[in-house]
Image (cartoon, coloured by chain):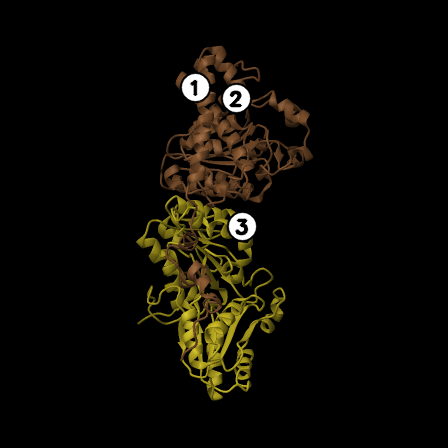
Amino acid sequence: MVEPLTTAQALNRALRDEMRSSKRVVVLGEDVGRLGGIFRVTDGLQKRFGQRRVFDTPASEAGIAGVALGLALAGFRPVAEMQFAAYSYPAFEQITSHIARYRLRTMSRVSLPLVIRMPVGGGLRGKEHHAENPETYFVHTPGLKVVTPSGPMEAYDLLTQAIRDPDPVVFLEPQVLYGKSEVGTPGAGDIPMHQAKLVHDGTDLTIVSYGAMVRTCLEAAERLATQGILAQVLDLRSLAPLDTDSIRDCVRFTGRAVVVHEAPMTLGVSAEVSARIMTECFEQLRAPVLRVTAWDTPNPPPSLEDLWRPSVERIVGAARQTFSYARPPG
Amino acid sequence: MSESKEIEGNAPYQILSPDGTASLGRAEIGLKDTDLRKLLRLMCAARALDDECVRMHTDGELLVYPPLRGQEAAQVGSAFALARNDFVFPSFREMAVALVRGVDPVEYLQYHRGTWHGGPYDPIANRFAPICVPLANQIVHAVGYAIGMKMRRRSVVTVAYFGDGSASEGDFHEACNWAGVHRAPVVLLCQNNRWAISVPFKEQAAAPIWTRARGYGFSGVQVDGNDVLAVLQVTKEAAARARAGGGPTLIEALTYRMGPHLTNDEPSRYRSDDEVGRWQELDPIERFRTYLLTEGIVSEKTAAAMDSAAVAFAREIRLRVAQFPPAGPDEVFEWVFDGPTLDMLRQQHLASPRAAAAGPTEALGAEPPDG
């Protein structure tokens, strides 16, 4: 019988399997050793692979990122953990000014096969600085790949591919998913890392999302189905690069799109997705692309979190609104 | 000279006094005549090329250049102490270090010419990382590389070069702390040239930089950065300590930036000619040349030949710099990732002169609608 696997366990298994297959893979971060990480993603790895390959670091995030760069130059494939996304901000300069640019700077003579993992998003009543959605910062930095899983099997698949990738990958782990489990057989590379995945089929509308919000979108799709609206749900998986072809194929087919994410609206990934849909699908669109996102404020206190995170109701509302525009089919 | 006031207490380590007399005998200095002559030859070459680079900026052949005049001893002495396989992480003023390490100056200078970001030399083959402009970031890379070499049990010493301004950055602290915790085989070489653009050292830090080493749990030393023999000796000791598992060393080489911060800077707005004149008296090359002449290690004739050879070398580099082919637009797209993304292929196509000539439809990136 296949046991259910939580996202944290799936990530742990991906790290374990990659460390087993390559001695060059090393894990570093705050509390990743003895403790096994705040969310236990690195649980048991130090015991298994030793302190040389799985090591705790000083509370020093610029150090973690810069040392990971140095380790990659020295021949390793480092997987660095930022304890929370907000704690990646001290490392921002290292990530954007160096990690993202080293290949170009060296005319491709040097590559940096490293992964920077970080928990993102709300849903766990995280206090200030514990529920950030920083994806736009990284997506807007050429030279970085940015991926985010929507569940345990995706987590295994994407992390495995991220570790094997020859370029730096920012790996965003929706923390609300860490404890969510799924029954399945984790496999790696069935779908290339940069490709989106259609997780729910429909004919009337495309809901584009990623990360933890994919589950909320699936619930919204179920609810819409009871109202006679058949919605597709497209899980982007990769935010940089964006899988424009899949987005285009879906929206050309349905003619309507709602883009959903937890990050604030302005210049969120939804802005880029909307712009691409406009360019690629203008002739097929029957309604403007609508967005369901957090509001443009700093993260609210945990008690107000549910008013900020997109809800099934808000997604359903936006989906229904796309049917209110009087544009003849093209 | 104001070091004794600034430093409070111990004078920096010195072998050659400013008049060229040595406090140590030849045996204690421990360098062969050929090495001593080579040091002078390298310092002369560095100065001649540095001067040439300033002229190249004036003539529009370099966009901007950070002159190192005055810092030749700190750079040549420290780089000369390293083994072939050791690895250097430079800041942006280390042309003389690059020269000693064997990096092709023509490739190195492409950064300042504006034709490529890092200089097209291979950092791994040259054991010399790309030029790093944001302050202190490269110190962290150096420590990471050193930790990696220690993990791989390689006998490699890593050296990070930085200035007094960099030591105020958070990355300096993070790098030092990591280096201490890991007893990383790294030498942290601060060239305190007294001026971070227009801010004097006394407004940069309240205590000498080398004294911070103790707080990180490793050795620190202050050296007369205009004394090539002293710099060479302390760097050699630091490298030997690192190689033997003794951990990092923070070296503060006290020197002076004789020229502007960059070729477009105006030092007269922030410092006096008197101050520059006082440092002129402490010139690192003059001091060393006097010593070699007095000891009979070089003759007047050899010393003059070195100078003219250096000038000829600098002229040759100038010609080759101008002939070096600039990067083409495709290379910028090709080298972002291991393979181009679809987005990049589309944008690369749009950036091509052919697409630009094709008119607005294609230039917008839109595909024609179906049917």
Which amino acid lies under the numbered mark 1 shown in the image of this protein? Arg
Query: Is disc 2 placed on a helix, strand or loop?
Result: helix
Above-or-below relation of B243 to B142:
above
Circles 3 and 2, Cβ within 8 Å, touching? The answer is no
Q: Which chain is the one coloured yellow?
A: A
Which amino acid is tagged 3? Glu
Residue on which disc 2 sits: B285
Quadrant position of the C terminus of chain B in the picture: bottom left
Q: Secondary structure at mark 3?
A: helix
- Taking depth in this image into account, of B208 and A268 the one nearest to the observer is A268
Q: Supply the letter of whichever chain is brown.
A: B
Host chain of mark 2: B
Location of mark 3 (residue): A93
Which of the two residues, B364 or A213, is positioned nearer the viewer here? B364
Kindly report which numbered mark, 3 or 2, lies closer to the viewer in this rendering.
2
State the residue position of label 1.
B37
Q: Quadrant of the N terminus of chain B?
A: top right
**Mark nearer the N terminus (2 vs 1):** 1
Which residue is rendered at x = 53% and y = 39% of the image? B60
* Chain of the residue displaying label 3: A
Q: Position of residue A305 (x, y in %)?
A: 59, 70
What x and y, as percent, mark residue B67? 55, 33
* Dot 3 alpha-carbon crowd within 10 angstroms: few under 14, some 14 to 19, many 20 or more: some
Q: Left or right: where does residue A264 sit relative to residue B143?
A: right
Q: Amino acid at mark 2?
A: Ile
